[in-house]
Image (tube, coloured by chain):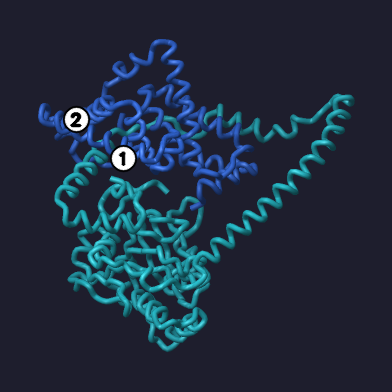
Amino acid sequence: MAYLDGELPTDQATQTLSHMELCPECQTLAADFRGVSQELMAWEVESSEVGIPSMINAALGERHQKPEAAKVNSPRLENRVLTSRWVWAGALAIVCVAVGLTLTVTSRNRNEDRSTAYASMASIEQYLIQNRNAEIALARSAAPEAISNNAKILVFGWQGYETAIEGKNGFVCMVERSWMSPFNSAEFWNPKVRVPMCFNPAAARSILPLTIKRTEMILAGISKAQMIDSIKAGFDNKELPLPESGAMCYMMSRAGYLNDALGHFVPHLMFYFPLTDKSSWGADLRDSPVTLNPQFRDGPEPITEFVIPVGKWSDGTAAPVM
Amino acid sequence: MTSDEALMLEFQGGSRAAFEELFARYRKPLYGFFGRRLNNPERAEDLTQETFLAVIRAASRYEPRASVRTYLYGIALKLLAAERRKLLISGALGRSVPEAKTDGTPECVLWVRQALEKLDAPEREILMLREYEQLSYSDIAELLRIPLNTVRSRLFRSRLALKSYLESEAKTNPDLRASAEQPRPGRRGMQ
């Protein structure tokens, strides 16, 4: 049930996913529970009110004026307040210094923890998913079954990505690892990262080669600086293609693990373009559902990537509101 | 899109626009929270406003320890508990649910409401927080101050009970089941 709610850690979710493919009882129970959720959604509640009610407007106005209203008129009281102000100011200063020191140390420790936790590459075993079927299931979970059931499936092995299942519809599903993060990401080597993706045919031709190239270089033990140079050269000499028109991918898995900060995040679609101003899509503007993905920002790949969240996971269940 | 937490901090710093954005995002969900639990649209509207008033009053003390979503539902749960205490004292609590207005309410909604009322109160609350408010297990555990495993087990029990109830009702009243299973145009606009 925690799997249905997207509450399992990635490794357990992938195990559950592969178990469910073989367990009719679990499939029935999952379908029943989804049915219950769907029927509960029949109860919708609509409020007739629009705009900010006057009572809240008044409270907002009051909050805005409060600092001015706090002025003191009585001289005696003012003296007392002033005297006590100095006492309080002194006490506050001591507390601030103490708290500041504590926060600085804590914050520094936290930042150090984050930046040093994945300072270098872990052993290859930690990036592998031992159960091949689990990786296939996880890759497929990136897109609705209508797409992923006929897609080509790649799995990551000791030699890099290899074809596990041939596809029929031109889509390619796979699970990316942490080294597809920006080069300056603190989680570039995070071995827990599992990112299920289903590329459409245009992205399979023009974006997937990047994943393959980065992975080959990682396995060859090339440094980040060399990787960056090699990718730049790859684009310069046309060995690496620019995104084709219409290139996009599905990332609708509830079992993925994008990084320590985002977990499985929310289901979304990604769209790829040669370097483009984000304003052309209205990305990152107030109320815009489009976000500029930082994956390639400031990186060697001349690619702009937009993210649009969607309301459902690939299995059709409702996703949390962002 | 600016995160709720960033908006809350902007509001703390004096931005009225940030508050208006939070209000726009959460007014309907909070109204739904109270509406489903009280079956009294007027009080639901009042308590939704009181939740936002509490946010305004406590803005200076806000610390981004939990998500704004959890923070808001924490306030809403406290207001709901106070409302229920008032209803209990006035003797209206037991009467309010059966007497909730049903005119114009689709049968499938009545059916869901009846099914939920069959659940034990603690299990119902967890199920509703998960299904309608879409809170995570850990958020629910924190809000209700119960262990995470209790959230899991109660959620499982409540879904199982609801499934059994819906199945038994479907056998005795197949027309009702059919109306509940009809495709719906969207997730808004009923009641």
| Mark 2 or mark 1, whichever is nearer to me | 2
Give the CA separation, mark 2 to mark 1: 23 Å
- Which residue is depicted at the point 34% across and 15% down? B94
Chain name for mark 1:
B
Q: Is residue B169 left or right of residue B47?
A: left
Label 2 with label 1: CB-CB less than 8 Å = no
Amino acid of disc 2: Tyr
The front one of A199 and A114 is A114
Residue A201 in view (yes/no): yes
Q: Which residue is mark 2?
A: B165
Mark 2 belongs to chain: B
User: In which image quadrant can residue B171 be found?
Assistant: top left
Location of residue B190 by image quarter: top left
Asked if one can make out residue B189 in the rendered structure from this viewpoint, the answer is no
Q: Secondary structure at mark 2?
A: helix
Chain B as rendered: colour: blue
Q: Which residue is mark 1?
A: B187
Residue A199 position within the rendered picture, expressed as x and y whole percent measured from the top left: 30, 68
- Between A204 and A180, the residue placed more toward the observer is A180
